[in-house]
Image: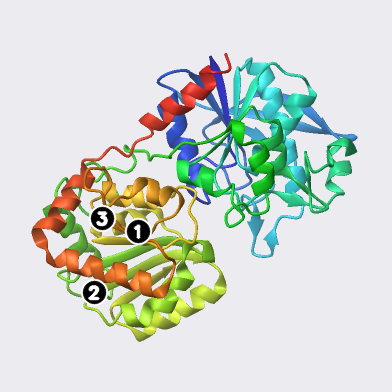
Amino acid sequence: MKILFASSEIFPYAKSGGLADVADALPRALSSYTELYRVIPLYGFMSKKDLQLSQSFEVSLGNKKYKINLYTKLQNTLNLFFLEAPLLSETQNLYCDKEGDYVDNDLRFAIFCKAVVALAVNLHVDILHLNDWHTSLCALFAKEQKLALKTVLTIHNLAYQGIFEKETLARLGISEKYFTMDSLEFYGKVNFLKAGIAYSDAVTTVSPSYAKEILTSEFGCGLEGFLTHHKAKLSGILNGINEVVFDPRSDKIIYTSYENIEGKYQNKVALLKTSKLKDPRKPLFVMITRLVEQKGIDLVLESMEKLLQNKLNLFIIGEGEARFTEQLQTLCLKHENFEFFNGYDEVLSHQLYAAADFLLMPSRFEPCGLNQMIAMRYGTIPIVHATGGLKDSVHEDRSKCGQGILFNKQSKQAFLLALKRALMLKKERKQFEALVSFNMQCDFSFEQSALAYLKIYESFV
């Protein structure tokens, strides 16, 4: 059985969020069981230095033809392909710049999808595994060509759907017959993700709870009825993490590798030496996030003055909306026990996981989330809103792997109460250290998830 795994981003080559980490870790786990290929766009910011040109071909969209150059990664055991194409490979970012989303994203990713389907035919794959809206048109193109291969779509975040004006149809040469409620039409516009949902043979989300939540008006983002219509092929499979990349025992970018709480404390001491934060005896809370409402940063800001009155240190790293950045920068100047890093930094993120006592994840909704699993792997206890994949992976039931603190209502009162519980836990030294050690022994890998995906694949062949 041959699988082609298509994604708009794969760590470490291109990353804007958790999709890149999943597109790295899941195929690695799957490759132990089946022949697997991965494909990603070759963006303008990526170097061709270690790439080898494999072949060139053309794809047609509308009345235009586009030349595709297919590159392979030398000495890569996971059969990684890079697709170079007009428009797609000319940008210095994945989806947007400081002005906003690229105006030709519809054409950029339609070209990618057409090229992915051509590659799938060339490789004679059995399964084409798609990820989010950027690859969803592959399901439609495969259907139009009446290909024998099966398609599986994974929805990583339903909030992002690839919605464009109706004129996109003519631009891409897609027949008007698909502009219906049962296909691509979405409130008078074209919705790429709907194509993936409608024409894929199976649809998965990244946690069992999120698969149920998106069938409701609260989390369905306007597609709850459409998803309910297709729920027979919908399932949720919890993500995992790459336990080789995220391993405190061998991590080369943290201050000191460790396998117990004593080594973890050394990382806190080392981090604080580079920070304005003082006294490693104080509980260290961290938040590693995108600065958007989905992640609950507004709730943290609302609670900040009260939170920082406690004897604790808080470190937030993130980038996103200017209104949140400005508030965090102001608070950072005001409070000596709060530090804010504006931006994304992989090294600092690892160092914070290693140094922290608690991780904050008060997300409004969370399809899966990886931060909480990485945190537990590093012995950092997560404090999470009980939603989506957070409640599937963080538990207060002591019989389950992955221990943390959950709050059920996304409110200031519930959040501050969870923080109070964390501070009380930290004072109970033996109980706190037992939870830290327990979490560090848990399995957060993609192994079980890979077997679940494999079961879906095998149902088609």
Residue, disc 2: 312
Q: Position of residue 327 (x, y in %)?
A: 47, 79
Q: Is residue 214 visible?
A: yes
Tell me the quarter of the picture where residue 122 sits.
top right
Amino acid type at circle 1 is Leu
Q: Earlier in the sequence, mark 2 or mark 3?
A: 2
Residue at 24% across / 59% down in the picture? 355
Q: Residues within 10 Å of mark 2 (few under 14, many from 20)?
A: some
Q: Is residue 291 left or right of residue 41?
A: left
In the visual, does 250 lie left or right of 72?
Answer: left
Q: Residue 339 location, x and y as percent?
A: 34, 73
The vertical placement of 302 against 19, above or below, is below
Q: Could you tell me if residue 292 is visible in this image?
A: no
Q: Which mark is residue 380?
A: 3
Are dots 1 and 2 in contact, CB under 8 Å?
no
If the image is split into quadrants, where does the C terminus sit? top right
Q: Residue at x 52, y 62 (%)?
A: 294
Q: What separation in Å lies between label 2 and label 3 (alpha carbons)?
A: 15 Å
The residue mark sitting in front, 3 or 1, is: 3
- What secondary structure is marked by label 3? loop
Query: How far, Cα to Cα, is label 3 from label 1?
Result: 15 Å
Question: Residue 383, located in which quarter of the rendered image?
Answer: bottom left
Q: Earlier in the sequence, mark 1 or mark 2?
A: 2
- Residue 82 falls left or right of residue 209: right
Label 1 belongs to which residue?
348
Q: Residues within 10 Å of mark 1 (few under 14, many from 20)?
A: some
Circles 3 and 1: CB distance less than 8 Å?
A: no
